[in-house]
């Protein structure tokens, strides 16, 4: 089922990643992937890899796709396979792609392009890793009583979303404990 979602990474008070996911945005699927990644990744190394990302716009993506398709006429590789960061099916898996980047493959004049201006108004869930605050924020557009406080710049960017869970990375409980909260809120 199409449960649209965003996986967001913040660093230096800027959105460095906003990966769209078309399907399975509920915590039971995407949220678990997100939390498991955060809990099982050495975030200092991941934070360095975030610096290899560069936001791009849709015209850049279109040009990149055209060039890629021209260069790969003989050995057809689908563009969205070669560039999973532009695939709506990637969702939270983008975190693993970024974590697997070899820094030496991206000297100063190269970078890993990402599209960061995804429209959240179509989404039901947003999973945010704030590397500055070492905090996760789990947001939904479902209205409920008892929403958690979030930083103003997140509140401003994602109007109409409510934080149903937040935690310092070091204090994250098990996925099952967070799932219980999601179930209690009927998310």
Image (spheres, helix red, strand yellow):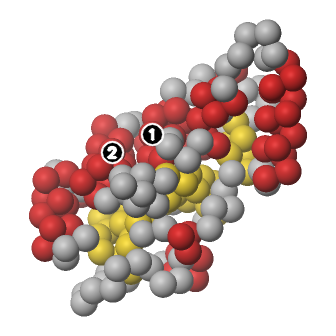
User: Foreground residue, 125 or 49?
Assistant: 125
Residue 44 placed where, x, y %? 47, 40
The residue indicated by pointer 2 is 33
Q: CA distance from mark 2 to mark 1?
A: 8 Å
Structural crowding at the residue carrying mark 2, measured as other residues with C-alpha within 10 Å and reported as few (<14), some (14–19) or many (≥20):
some
Does residue 38 lie above or below 79 as drawn? below
Residue 51 placed where, x, y %? 65, 43
Q: Give the quarter of the figure containing the N terminus.
A: bottom left
The residue indicated by pointer 1 is 93
User: Foreground residue, 11 or 113?
Assistant: 113
- The structure residue drawn at horizontal position 17% and vertical position 59%, both measured from the top left corner, is 179
Relative to 56, 49 lies left or right: left
Q: Are marks 2 and 1 in contact (CB under 8 Å)?
A: yes
- The structure residue drawn at horizontal position 42% and vertical position 52%, both measured from the top left corner, is 23
Residue 31 position by quadrant: bottom left
User: Foreground residue, 67 or 159?
Assistant: 67
Secondary structure found at label 2: helix
Secondary structure found at label 1: helix
- The structure residue drawn at horizontal position 67% and vertical position 19%, both measured from the top left corner, is 77
């Amino acid at each position: 089922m199409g449960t649209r979602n965003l996986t967001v990474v913040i660093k230096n008070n800027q959105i460095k990643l906003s990966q769209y996911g078309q399907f399975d945005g509920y915590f039971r699927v995407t949220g678990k992937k997100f939390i498991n990644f955060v809990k099982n990744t050495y975030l200092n190394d991941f934070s360095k890899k975030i610096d290899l990302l560069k936001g791009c716009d849709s015209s850049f993506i279109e040009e990149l796709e055209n060039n890629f398709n021209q260069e790969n006429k003989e050995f057809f590789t689908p563009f969205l396979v070669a560039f999973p960061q532009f695939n709506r099916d990637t969702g939270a898996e983008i975190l693993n792609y970024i974590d697997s980047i070899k820094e030496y493959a991206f000297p100063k004049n190269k970078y890993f392009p990402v599209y960061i201006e995804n429209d959240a108004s179509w989404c039901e869930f947003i999973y945010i890793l704030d590397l500055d605050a070492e905090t996760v924020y789990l947001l939904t557009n479902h209205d409920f009583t008892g929403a958690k406080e979030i930083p103003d710049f997140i509140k401003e960017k994602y109007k109409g979303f409510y934080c149903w869970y937040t935690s310092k990375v070091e204090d994250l409980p098990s996925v099952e404990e967070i799932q219980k909260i999601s179930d209690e809120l009927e998310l």
